[in-house]
Image (spheres, rainbow, N blue to C red):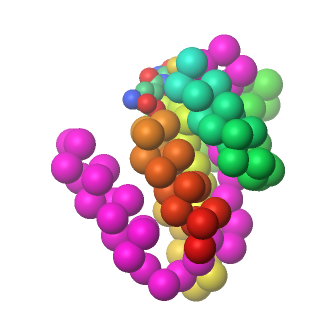
Amino acid sequence: MQMRENDNIMELSRTNEKAANVQLFYFASCPYCIKVRIALWWMKIEIPKKNISSDPEFKAELISGGGKKQVPCLRIEMENNKIQWLYESRDIIRYLRKTASN
Ligand SMILES: N[C@@H](CCC(=O)N[C@@H](CS)C(=O)NCC(=O)O)C(=O)O
């Protein structure tokens, strides 16, 4: 499982497609989401955020798109309109750091 997630982030990093659009699915009291939000603050990156506990439509969007209810999850819309759903706070932070430095 971990290998597959690492493969995903490697694949995303390798591609020349830059993230055109990202959204963070989260809920306020989730410690892993807080970790990602602090990293965003630290990196001075502002992205749209969707709180799944305050809006059932966001929760439904996460489950139907990403395949599970787990947060944090980063929805990444690539320049070719392909959508990637990236779970795991560590991978999300790594991805955002990479794209911010490009
Ligand atoms: N290893 C994950 C853990 C994420 C996690 O456990 N998130 C909890 C909320 S704090 C969750 O979404 N659990 C599934 C659920 O509530 O249905 C990460 O680092 O992002």
Q: Is residue 88 visible?
A: yes
Q: Is residue 97 left or right of residue 44?
A: left
x 77%, y 48%: residue: 44
x 38%, y 76%: residue: 14
Q: Is residue 55 left or right of residue 16?
A: right
Q: Is residue 71 left or right of residue 58?
A: left
Q: Is residue 35 above or below residue 66?
A: above
x 60%, y 19%: residue: 30
Q: Is residue 67 visible?
A: no
x 43%, y 47%: residue: 91
In the rendered image, residue 7 lying in the magenta stretch gets the answer: yes
- Location of residue 71 by image quarter: top right
**Image location of residue 20, percent across then percent down:** 68, 73
**Image location of residue 86, percent across then percent down:** 47, 51
Quarter of the N terminus within the rendering: top left
Q: Is residue 58 left or right of residue 82?
A: right
Q: Is residue 96 above or below residue 21?
A: above
Q: Which residues are magenta?
A: 1-30
Q: Which one is nearer the viewer's eye here, 35 or 29? A: 35
Q: Which one is nearer the viewer's eye here, 33 or 68? A: 33
Quarter of the C terminus within the rendering: bottom right
